[in-house]
Image: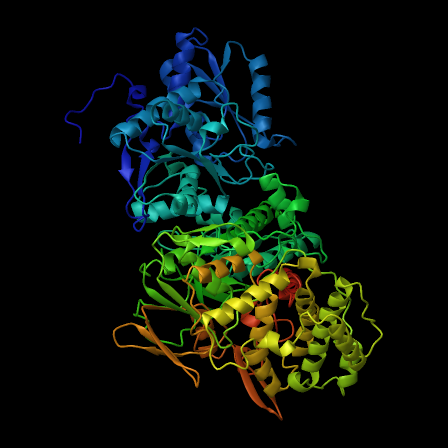
Amino acid sequence: MKDKLQVSNSILETIGDTPLVRLKNIFFDSKVEVYGKLESFNPSGSVKARTSYNILQKAMEAGELRKGDTVIESSSGNMAIGLAQACLVMGLKLIVVVDPKLNKLTSQLLETYGTTIEMVTEPLEEGGFLGARLAKVKELLKTTKNSFWSNQYGNLDNPKTHYQTTKEIYEALDGRLDYLFVATSTCGTLMGCADYIKANHPNTKIIAVDAVGSVLFGGEAGTRKIPGHGAGVNSQFLNEDYIHDFVKVNDLECAVGCWELLEKESILVGGSSGAIIKAFQKYEHQMEEGSRCAFILSDGGSRYLDTIFNQEWLLNNIPGAYDALTPVGGWKIKPSSEYNVAIVGLGPKGLYGLERLLAHLKSENVQETVNIHLYNNNQYFGAGDVYRMDQPDFLKMNFANTKIDVRSHKQPESINNTGSYVQWLSASTGIDENQLKDKFSSRKMVGEYLSASLEDLISSAPENIKIHRRIQEVINITENEGLLQLETRSESKDKTLVKVHNVLLTTGHAGNRSEVSENKGNSSNIDFVYPVEKKLAGIQSNSIVAIKGMGLTFIDAALALTEGRGGRFNGDGENMQYLPLGNEPAIIYPYSRSGALMIPRVGEMPKVPKLRFFTSEKLNNIRKNFAHKFDFSEELLLLIRQEFTYRYYKLAFRNLDENLKETLGFSEMLEEIEIFHKKYPSEKRFSFEELQSPFLNSETTNTEDVAKILEETISMVSFGVKSPLLAAISAWHDISPIFNELYSFGGLTARSHQIFDHQYAPFFNRISYGPPLENMYKVLALIKAVILDFSFAKSPEVKELQYGKFELSNFSSEADNTSIVDYHIDARIPKMKIPSQSSLLFRNLFGENKMQLFQNTDETGNYETGGLDLTKEGHPINIDGKCIDNITIYGTPTEGVTFDNDTLSRNRNDFSSIWAKNVIHHFKKNISNSNNIK
């Protein structure tokens, strides 16, 4: 409270010294201090009171403007009112050029002040309504005597005004401010704040809040329903070098921000301030904990009572408003018909679904409003958990760069302009595409690409397609009035309900398994490693750690506990050495069922002949009829072995200038192979059994055994295009698409389906989807550094002890071996296993009989994979045997019913394309029904 009330000589002297309010309730769980500068306390109700008075005062002091002259300005509202009040006090006339977005209350207020209003009704092709308004201003200046253009878009007294605005914030905060969020328009306020900060507090970061459809920070001009921020023409003030970053916010997000601030803080603001609220929520994760942040809240909301705070206007003008916000006191009216779609899980598969849907909507020239609701558990939309951008750089891809592409090569053509990963990476780094194709990137970098592709898709979407991002977990789907109602939980609200016509579920791995312990409170048992820096942070240095699983996740965990803790790898290839820092565990014991490590990958694979044995002709000879189920062990495995052997020796022969003829039968081929080995006795023989189980004849393993096989494998793989081992493995890459067709939807006999899933699927995954060669050199270096110890690598007995530790044991005829470990990590990829190990969403759907388990049943037995019963279009089947055709499952949740749902694959089990077509069908049917009702 001020000690004494100040007496002002005019209303204009009350401009400035607006309140700064701590926003505690709306951001109650934020790690950042947030303050709002309430510019609505200026006498004309907005920050433009400052700008208007300063421009007019400086013009009169310079003799450019005299009492009785006419001021002309283009404005969407606030500047007009600020000028109207100032002109009335200063004895000036005012003409304001506006467009149809001017709200009724502002128009009435201007008329009350005696302002002349000139309205333009048609936008310019280039420049939109703002361009049309400026053209009208220039016309009026020529025809109006003694006229002056206040020119908020180019008058330097505009930004200079806000030296004082910014100074007031620093004085109130004792000079400490880390971030300042300012909405854009003319960019006068923005650049005035930026100029002051650069001169006085250069460490403060300015975040510009722009509108979707604004051209200020690039992109094409688009229609905006909420005025007050953004612009259709470039700013004469903007200097991006002064701006740390910018965030674009759409009309819906502006409205949601306004209502959230009202509900939580009882502060009524206009659209640009609502935009700042949502921009902060988008950007908050990039801010350091304990940072201090301020918003310039440019105006109050009383002038928006007939727009942003009018329920009918919201429903008629802001698509998705009914589902995205709840007015204080609740909705009093219902929305008109719109089509709503949801994608639950916005990793790569969800991104692919969005890409196909947008392509179909554009191809079909859909003109009606379609709302697409994107649900993800965190802010990493597009990337998902696997490729989230906060991961360390040493977590590498097992896909060569050239194989990564968000775009589908199916029709209709993709609207994505980002291009393939290699094209994007080349543009981002300046490195030639040819040098990048066969390299392996970090998952973090691929996440950047996926995220950039999502933003490109959203910005390329037609104007009538409204996309809403929701950081929420969907926990149930129910039916309500013929629609699917999505029940969610999030940090900010326990439950929100959104109704949609169609859903794509791409939720990734359904649950995390921990077979060692049911005690969820045991911090020494880690059942899932991602994000590695957070999940493994509690593991103490010099401790003893066991890791279950020896696949990609094991490598990630091992590197996180070594390289991620400051250790360094020096040298290349076989000469690589690990230099510990002292923060590592003393010993890491990896183990698995087979005790075998993955086969590493190289970028450029050998050139191989087409399949010879696992062919349609051979399969048709086996198939007795179209209803025939294949027995994997008895009918398919032999052909796979033959294909591996053929590929291996075809290249082994070629390397020594020999020729293994394609026309030979397999028995004749084996005879040629024997002759080959007699001629070249030092050449490595190929054994499918040895590849499958390197320690098949050993009861236990030791580090020396594993290191020896690893060195041999690395040596064979490092031949690259001349590696017979890689040629053999490549057979599975070509076989698996054909095999998927045989496997899917119970195509194998029940008994052999079970055998394949438990014995052979892990093997094919181990040899075909291994890490880049560089990471296996790192594993070898960690073995040499005596950090990785494989004494228990093959199927040890694991016991949890009472005091939170674990015991690993190997008992064999050769030796007994036991060790006590401090931490146990489950580094296996969790598989679908409903209902016991799955997300709350699938547990609810299963528990309410909306979905049922897939069962492969025949004369050989009954096998439950743990997956959902699905149609061949990816629709779940409920307990009554009814297909739910407005829900589609895609990606990992289909495993066990389909085979090989690799995260980045665009072609395998592509239910996204089926779903997009299905949405178009449902949409047309829904629109037709709506029209018939009308």
Q: Quadrant of the N terminus?
A: top left
Residue 900 falls in which quadrant of the image?
bottom right
Residue 742 position within the rendered picture, expressed as x and y whole percent measured from the top left? 68, 78
Task: Name the residue furthest bottom.
Answer: 859
Task: Name the residue furthest right.
Answer: 663
Question: Is residue 218 or residue 804 the one in the foreground?
Answer: 804
Identity of the residue drawn at 38% across and 43% down: 287
In the visual, does 364 lie left or right of 206?
A: right
Identity of the residue drawn at 40% across and 20% down: 160
Camera sees residue 381: no
Camera sees residue 804: yes
Question: Is residue 141 or residue 624 the one in the foreground?
Answer: 624
Residue 904 falls in which quadrant of the image?
bottom right
What colour scheme governs how the chains and residues are painted in the rendered image of this protein?
A: rainbow
Identity of the residue drawn at 49% across and 26% down: 239
In the visual, does 832 lie left or right of 47?
A: right
Task: Name the residue furthest top.
Answer: 63
Task: Name the residue furthest left.
Answer: 3
Residue 226 position within the rendered picture, expressed as x and y whole percent measured from the top left? 49, 39
In this figure, what is the number of numbered marks? Answer: 0
Q: Quadrant of the C terminus?
A: bottom right
Residue 506 falls in which quadrant of the image?
bottom right
The relative height of residue 676 versus residue 259 in the rendered view (above or below) is below
The relative height of residue 878 versus residue 423 in the rendered view (above or below) is below
Residue 522 position within the rendered picture, expressed as x and y whole percent measured from the top left? 30, 70
Question: Is residue 20 or residue 447 the one in the foreground?
Answer: 447
Residue 45 position within the rendered picture, expressed as x and y whole percent measured from the top left? 36, 30
Identity of the residue drawn at 52% across and 72% down: 596
In the visual, does 322 lie left or right of 650?
A: left
In the visual, does 502 lie left or right of 247?
A: right
